[in-house]
Image (cartoon, coloured by chain):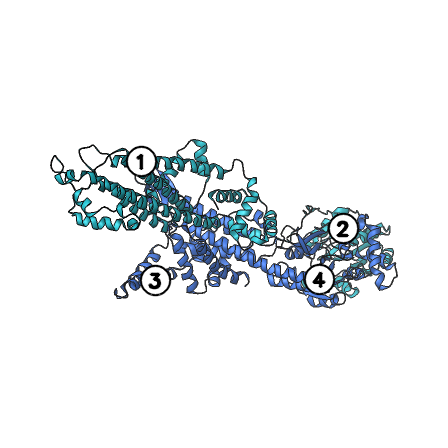
Chain colours: A blue, B cyan
Amino acid sequence: MITSHPKFAVVGHPNKGKSSIVSALALDDSVQVSNTPGTTTKKRSFPLSVDGKILYELFDTPGFQRARRVLAWLHQHDVRADKRPDIVRAFINQYRYDERFNDEIELLEPIMQGAGIIYVVDGSKPYGAEYEAEMEILRWTGQPSMALINHIDSSDYSDEWDRALGQYFKMVRKFNPMRATFSQHLGILESMAQLKEEWIDDVKISIDLFKKQNNQKIERSASLIAKLLYQSISLVDRLSIEDEEATKDEKAKIESKYKDSLRELEIKTQEGIKEIWKHKRLKIEQNILPFNGLDLFSKETASIFGLTKKELMVMGITSGAVTGATIDLLFVGHTFFIGGAIGAVVGGTGAYFGFDELSEIQILGTTLGKRDLEIGPMKNKNFPFILIGRALYHTSKIANRSHASREDIDIDIHIDLESVFKNKWLTNDEIRDNLEKYHKKFRQPKDIEPEILKEYDGLIKSVLVGLINS
Amino acid sequence: MSISSYLNLQQLLESNSVTIEESRSFGLTNLSLKDSPKEQLLSWTKLYQDRLKKPLLSDRVSSYLYNITFVLVILGFIFGLFSAIGLLSYNGSEPVNVIYFISVVIFLPILTMMLTIFSMFRANSAKSVLVHISPAFWMEKILALLPNSMSDNIKEIKINPLLSNWLIIKRSQLIALFFSIGLFVGLLGVVITKDIAFAWSTTLQITPDMLYEFLHIISIPWSYILPSAIPSQELIEHSQYFRLGDRLSENIISHASSLGEWWKFLALSTLFYAIFLRFVVLIISSFGLRYALDKSIFRLDGAMRLLREINEPIIETNAPNQEPLFIPTNGKYNKVIDSKAKKHDYSVIQGLGMRYDELLVISDSMGISASQYFIVGGSNSLEEDDRVISQSSDEVLLFVKAWEPPMMDFVDYLADLTNNKKVKRVVIMPIGTLEEDYKASPQNIDIWANKLSLSQNNKVWLKR
């Protein structure tokens, strides 16, 4: 049967990770994946469509249940090799409504409608003769086929599988849907394209689109993180007070309100990131507390994601010296470059002493005798780096996460991150100083020009690219 | 581009009433707009603004702004008119001091225009102090005090500081312009209806020569067109007066007829400084507002996302239909034999999907033996399995690979085996791989137990 677009049916023994592979290749985490055999009972189509036009279609199918019986039926018809697909069609027609062969019909139907075969086996378990009936049936269909060796566990029986599968399939590839990187995903698509010459163009277009889409996802994530930083740094919260002076409780209340607002902004961004990377299931199941309760303002967070006091002081010195040097330049050096020196000292000590404070709490006079307590914008120079660190970490976890995975994100910060993650993205002082240059602008009571935010987006993106593709 | 389209776009973005598919469809049907994002946003807004709640907030806000501005413009005009009348009030005994009028029509406009231009440069700042001195700023405050429905509408608007500052700047210029027109009309009215004797007087040590020089500079803009509207040196000398003394000086009285000549200068000063220059600033502020609108639409929350939705292809990889929910059964199988129980020999040992030598090794490693060993399933044909069943009797031990799921092929075989009347009992024993020393994991045994629970065959036992 001639089809307008390439189709691929993912078939195999039950419980060998067919749905996981489909979930990973289709970037759809709504597929039911479990270690209980027989989770998939009906074939399900996953078309890759661009503006409604389908470029290729993947089919998730139930596993073989009575392969030997089907093969026995086929063998009853002693025909030439070129007529074998007709016999398979005849089987489908004869047993379409027979419940015993429901799973076989479901998996053979898309194949007989022109789908290429992707036969999935578990390379972490030994090869067995019971697979031969399945592979023989697939050979009878006459459709182009390839095999994917999935590794569900750590053991490795790939060699014996390679030898067996090589006798039945044009191509044998290894693919672990749980750990597959983006480039491995594209590699599998390239292999699928090789199954039939006329599929190559469509699948190549799809690969280019995936690359473009991936880049767009990184851009959108960077943009969300940049927005989070801008909103958090420039955030100002107010609280009405009755008396001339604010009480301790009132000060604590506004500080808590301010922190809650910042936490909310972070959670909102995390939700946005999950949406960009199409991890809907994770959106529902993950604990609302970001980072498993490792609070944004905890000392632990600061020690993992933030700058050290020394780094902060160096950054303050650099930033202060630049400001001072500008003054020196204005006076054509007649200040004997004292401006730069003073700037460096003030900047350095300012950054050092502001290590634990977030922002000043000010009392503002308003009309009718009422007063407002105001907190923000964020004065703490370390906070933006903590926030970026957490956002980058979260985004890289989400972006690199397989859609086949059904577990909550394992944010084992204590083992994974300490003194490691920061070094992954904050690779040099230039990045730190460049970021601080923008943070300084965000602290100003000004509406930031979109161009500046775009520049900042670009900076975040350059960091994110390294983390996601690493 | 108007404030209405800005507000409509803002509302549409907030309401999320347009789907991604619709936005992309708009992008595909309007490919000619691909390189002009502003036009894309405006056309998109125009296409979908019908989806907003009627009456449109933008219409209501525009109407309120128009009405309030109109009232303030009229008030400005009246204030200007009465200011002129007040400044030119002439009681017949003392001449009108032109310095007052010059201050209001030249110095005040120049000062306020300078402040305006300064505030234009600072318009991007969220806390621009200068807009606070603008009457239009207070106009916004007045709007907030209006009756409930009206003030609610105003509260709904979230305009970014750049745009709101430019809105205030432009409206301030309009009000100031009408104030100046009021001054001019008042001046003409008073000049026509009264015979005013103008003079000048100041506490400062200014000589008529100095004033002449100064007024000459001020009159440069019209000196070539209307030289008669420049006060002559004689007029300046003749019209100087001092407050000391009960009576006017002889000099003024003798030149009383020429003192009215000042009006031309005052009229031209008003026209040029208070009206023309203000009009120029108004035009600049109109351009500024347009620039602010252009910039602000891209700053709207969701505008960039919308542009992406319009211009980027929708790539879908998801299944269009929902998968039927799979509810796993968690059946327990009660007929269980403990694998640690005392071992005994079986009549037949079978291995499902195993090699014969493998079956012997497994049996041996477990210390179990039988009189017959058979391979079933796997690469066996169904006929071969049938032969094995017919040769089986009494107690059969069936080894199965625990890591492989129990399939219907196994269920069929088990049914056939237990249907053999010679077979009294079938013991299923899931085993692990060689690496696992043939010990199956409890999770895998559970899967087999679950499968057996579905058939509940009296002859079948599970060894675990």
> Which secondary structure lies at badge 2?
strand
> Which secondary structure lies at badge 3?
helix
Q: Which residue is mark 3?
A: A322
The answer to whether residue B106 of the structure is visible from this angle is: yes
Q: Which residue is mark 2?
A: B461
Q: Which residue is mark 4?
A: A199
What amino acid does circle 2 point to? Trp
Image depth: mark 4 or mark 1 in front:
1
Image depth: mark 2 or mark 3 in front:
3
Tell me: B89 left or right of A452. Answer: left
* Mark 3 chain: A
Q: Earlier in the sequence, mark 4 or mark 3?
A: 4
The answer to whether tags 1 and 2 share a subunit is: yes
Q: Which residue is mark 1?
A: B81
Image depth: mark 1 or mark 2 in front:
1
The answer to whether tags 3 and 1 share a subunit is: no
The answer to whether tags 4 and 3 share a subunit is: yes
Q: How many marks?
A: 4
**Mark pair 4, 1: CA separation:** 82 Å
Circles 1 and 2 in contact, beta carbons < 8 Å: no
**Mark pair 1, 2: CA separation:** 109 Å
